[in-house]
Amino acid sequence: MDLYPATSHAAGDRLDPVAIIDIGSNSVRLVAYDRLGRAPTPIYNEKVLCGLGRNVLTTGRLNEEAVRRALSALARFRVLCDTMGVRRLHVLATAAARDAENGPDFLEAARNACGAEIQLLSGRREAELSALGVISGFNAPDGVVGDLGGGSLELVDVRGAVVGQGVTMPLGGLALQDLSGGSLKKAAKLVREHMRKAAPQLETLKGRTFYAVGGTWRALARLHMAARQYPLHVMHGYTVEPSDELSFLQVVEQSDAAQLQDVEAISEARRPLLAYGAVVLEEIIRVGRPREIAISATGVREGLLYEQLDRDGRAADALLAAAAELNALRARSPAHAEDLIAWTDRFVESLDGPETLDERRLRHAACLLSDLAWRAHPDYRGEQSIALIQNGAFTGIDHPGRAYLALAVALRHEGVAPEKASPVLRALAGPRLFERARLLGALLRVAFPISAAMGGVLERAPLTATDRTVTLRLPASARSLGNDRLLNRVRGLGRLIGRDGKIEMDG
């Protein structure tokens, strides 16, 4: 099985879009992806905040105006799907349609509006798909997934690719606002009472990761980023220490939402729900005592797509699959990246210091991404590499790993002196990954003047290290490549790891 399969589509290939419409308690959303695969790329994403779940638990019915807005959105989404050539459309409905007495009538009207059958998810099924979404979006996840919607909260344990038993509770933002009559104090009491049902899930959370799924928690994370002046505006994989998060959540609960920093980035319809989301997350942290909170941008929709893959497709590495696709689309010679992986494998294996499995997969991803910016002016290739990689739509990677990728490729263009590195990315990567990025950057600076970014070259020019020396061996047919520029790069690599550098010629 190939973890970064060479099935990535070429730039001229026709898209084969697959789309999902998610009829939630707070919003109705359409997301269309380029194709079904391990790392599908959204090509269109639109949501309409309809508020279907508002007052359902007290009135028992979906609000007529909310239904009107939802049906209008569904009709619009049908036209968009036809425009994009979507042949596979999945329509999901969750808590609001599940709990309302007029839910069946709404679902029939919704089916007519969008022209597709609708899957009404049970709470347990919703929890399962949320867990699969996290499995699809994180490398070897270990913890508890919490999916907070407008009407419900689902909690489910995940360990690698294994999904545990899920539980659903009426603790979504709209549901809590409804049941509590707008009182946060009463909402907190309701949360404590319902969380007793989640004891099997929360008892396993101590010292592990809590994966937060859902728009309200992503909105809270956005505000937390602003309060911390966090430099990387990528939601997926953003992690928070529980003690830091508790302090922030209490500020949210006690403040007027309009006064929170950067709140203008949050839709007005969602702002009243922030405090309720904060109450739920605070109780999970207090009871479960997780090691960290990780924000997930992947959930039910991505879980449904992941479930449809075959066994090999699900086992593939999401980061490497996405990097391989970008390599196929943008590199001068995509085969060169595969050569780089093998060439750097051999060099790293000759070193004394260990490389972890995660560092290895990050190095492979960086090799696949190493030639993305070749069309830019040489003076700006490092800068463009950073822009493409640090903000790329990657999953299966945390923020330090993302910083490593951007640094390694940028340093290939800029040089590996510490002062050449972005201070922001250096701080995000941390000392260990920063040095690994410098090492790979130095390796890439040796490789490209030999290969000119073409495939089938590096295997004839092995680079190895001994206790004292880094040696590049060139074949007789390439003797003239061994000029001062290349020698200086080999010596620079050697200095980085405390060794001399030299070039030897065959023949």
Image: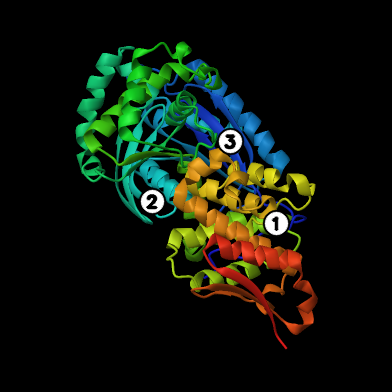
Residue occupying image coordinates x 49% and y 72%: 349
For badge 1, the amino acid type reads: Asp
Q: Which amino acid does label 2 sit on?
A: Pro
Q: Tell me the amino acid under the disc marked 3.
A: Leu
- Nearest to the observer: residue 149 or residue 260: 260
- SS class, disc 2: loop
Residue 334 seen in render: no
Q: Which residue is rendered at x = 60% and y = 63% of the image?
A: 493
Tell me which numbered mark, 3 or 2, is placed earlier along the sequence: 3
Relative to the observer, which residue lies in front, 101 or 24? 24
Q: How far apart are marks 3 and 2 (CA)?
A: 27 Å
Q: Which mark is residue 371?
A: 1
In percent of the image, x 34 and y 40: which residue is there?
292
Name the front one of labels 3 and 2.
2
Residues at circles 1 and 3 in contact by the CB criterion of under 8 Å: no
Residue at image coords 69%, 47%: 382
State which tag comes first along the sequence, 1 or 3.
3
Q: Nearer the viewer, residue 311 or 145?
A: 145
User: What element does badge 3 sit on?
Assistant: strand
In front: label 1 or label 2: 1
Task: Assess whether mark 2 and mark 3 are in contact (beta carbons under 8 angstroms).
Answer: no
Residue at numbered disc 2? 141
Q: Quadrant of residue 45?
A: top right
Q: Where is residue 209 in the image (x, y as percent from the top left)?
A: 33, 44
Displayed quadrant of residue 145: top left
User: Who comes first in sequence, dot 1 or dot 2?
Assistant: 2
Residue bearing mark 3: 30
Q: Which mark, residue 349?
A: none
